[in-house]
Amino acid sequence: MDATARYVLDEQIGYLLRRVTQRHLAIFSAHLPQVTTTQWAAMARLMQVGPLSQNLLGRETGMDAATIKGVVDRLARVGLVATSPDPSDRRRLVVDLTAEGRAYCAQGLAAAAAVSDETLAPLEPAERAQLLALLSRLV
Amino acid sequence: MDATARYVLDEQIGYLLRRVTQRHLAIFSAHLPQVTTTQWAAMARLMQVGPLSQNLLGRETGMDAATIKGVVDRLARVGLVATSPDPSDRRRLVVDLTAEGRAYCAQGLAAAAAVSDETLAPLEPAERAQLLALLSRLV
DNA sequence: CCAATCTCGTATGCATACGAACAATCGACC
DNA sequence: GGTCGATTGTTCGTATGCATACGAGATTGG
């Protein structure tokens, strides 16, 4: 058996991650068509920890500065978050949920939980926990 | 404990998938800076099964028609694949590796294997197999 | 106190990704 | 043999995601 035969695309971690992510994105957009996964992640983080500067929000959700700017811009455009200058540091832009954003989060939590459930549906409960634990160690 | 407290972003499958994918992409681009993961996937598939129509190659690698077109265009632009019309179906564009593309694949296989290894490095061998098996069931 | 350095937000370019719409073509059924 | 539905490739619009570069502002070391 040569090297070519041993490298099977469908068994590579990167390929599997991409395929599973695709399925997850489809499930997400069926349950929460108004926002994207990254937009939801930003809102969920703001819900958890309160107002954050734009860059810090990016770091807290695994997005670089250029990416989080686009996400915040789009969320602000539809009125789910609002930005304001930080009086104590004029470089900073503080991002927070609006009342509408908070209501959307509260109303969408059940759907978000359903997304995770449906994504993991092919696995038994013990296997789901195992998968999440293994993935956590690869971040 | 209310619903908000139970939804922890860092424990959601979608969020974990995104973070692990980001780490994997960084490892990949360090080992194979010339191509992207999707470009590599397309070439690996062509290596496995031979020439394919553009759309079929997309389906075989989990990319929709719009995405595979861009991937094939960029690979063709740098001479790693070549396209030719299918004589038996004038709608089809047959995609195949060039000699240079085949050489690049042969030379890059070790690096690609190292990418998968490094991505899974935090796990024991048995855990790696377990993770791949669980992910396979979620595709 | 001030100069080197760092941080923050912004902007641009490139590469996925998907949905939608479109023209050309093929196939199947009548 | 002609019509209708499906397939193929293309294009457009939107949304990540990273690298890079830049100006304005903050911080720290000397």
Image (spheres, coloured by chain):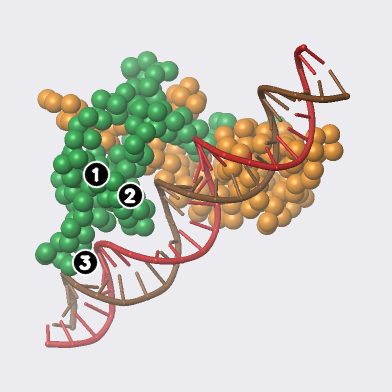
Chain colours: A green, B orange, C red, D brown
- Residue drawn 26% across the image and 30% down it: A108
Chain letter of the residue carrying label 2: A
- The three-letter amino acid code for the residue at tag 2 is Arg
- Residue drawn 45% across the image and 38% down it: B120
On the rendered structure, is A59 left or right of B98?
A: left
- Residue drawn 27% across the image and 56% down it: A55
Query: Residue A74 got which mark?
Result: 2
- The three-letter amino acid code for the residue at tag 3 is Arg
Marks 2 and 1 belong to one chain: yes
Residue placed most toward the observer, A17 or B76: B76
Q: CA distance from mark 3 to mark 1?
A: 23 Å
Chain letter of the residue carrying label 1: A
Query: Residue A91 got which mark?
Result: 3
Which mark sits nearer the N-terminus, 2 or 3? 2
Residue labelled with disc 1: A80
Mark closer to the observer (3, 1): 1
Which mark sits nearer the N-terminus, 2 or 1? 2
Residue B108, position as x, y percentages in the image: 63, 48
The C terminus of chain A sits in image quarter: top left
Residue B135 drawn above or below residue D16 = above
